[in-house]
Amino acid sequence: TWVLSNNVKAHTHAFSGGICKTCKYEYPLKITAQSGIFVVTSNGTNIRNQPYSTGSAKVVRTAKKNAALTVVKKTTNAANQVWYQLSDGNWVYSANVAQRFTVKYNANGGTSAPASKTYLKGNSFTVSTVKPVRTGYVFQGWSTSKTATKISYKAGSTYTFSKDMTLYAVWKTCTHSYSGGVCKNCKYEYPLKITALSGTFVVTSNGTNIRNQIIYVDIS
């Protein structure tokens, strides 16, 4: 079938809610994978049954500020807005949420690692100043590699990041500096070799203390 070109003209869509007001063409949505926990940044945020892809999109509920939402997919609609699909199948506008990331700390052979903390995308985070401990080693700082010998994240310093992250403690073998038999740097206790000894000994200093353990001397 043919038509004379003088009788037709190119049509430019004018979308309203994803539907062309003139020809009723529906804007095609390309939905792609997206995952993560997103936090509501605007109180009373609308959760809709579709990403404004058609004029029949409805509000199914509202979310309070700081509410956590599980995102599984995303799309861009006719108005060039990015929308996120939630695990329940409904949608939220990207401008009303921010992705949440978690920083975890791993003592990497030691103990007493700092507690994990969460941050929102675009915000900076400060590395914990809580130091893990490991007998025979001195704590240096943190790295994203558990085999690192040099630090990439310094305690107390501020950084930005855009994904979940685990920081591993970086250790250096301690060259002991003893005070009272315990290393001042790594708390390593000087190993005592106890051997047999018997006999009667006489106290030579008046008021001598009898203790429940040996008082180490500083042998540094």
Image: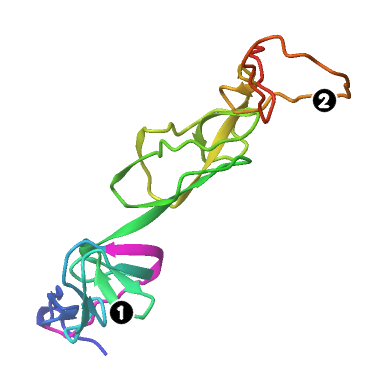
Q: Residues within 10 Å of mark 1 (few under 14, many from 20)?
A: some
Q: Quadrant of the N terminus?
A: bottom left
Near mark 2 (Cα within 10 A), the count class, few <14, some 14-19 or many ≥20, is few
Query: In the shown orientation, is residue 132 left or right of residue 44?
Result: right
Residue 17 in the image: state x and y as whole percent.
16, 78
The answer to whether residue 71 is magenta is no
Q: Which mark is residue 199?
A: none
Q: Which residues are magenta?
A: 22-39
Residue 90: which numbered mark, if any?
Answer: 1
Q: Place residue 28 in its image quadrant.
A: bottom left
Query: Is 67 displayed left or right of 161 in the figure?
Result: left
Could you tell me residue 218's position as x and y percent? 63, 13
171 horizontally vs 55: left or right: right
Residue 68 placement (x, y as % from top left): 32, 67
In the depicted view, which residue is nearer to us: 215 or 31? 215
Q: Mark 1: which amino acid?
A: Asn
Residue that mark 2 sits on: 194
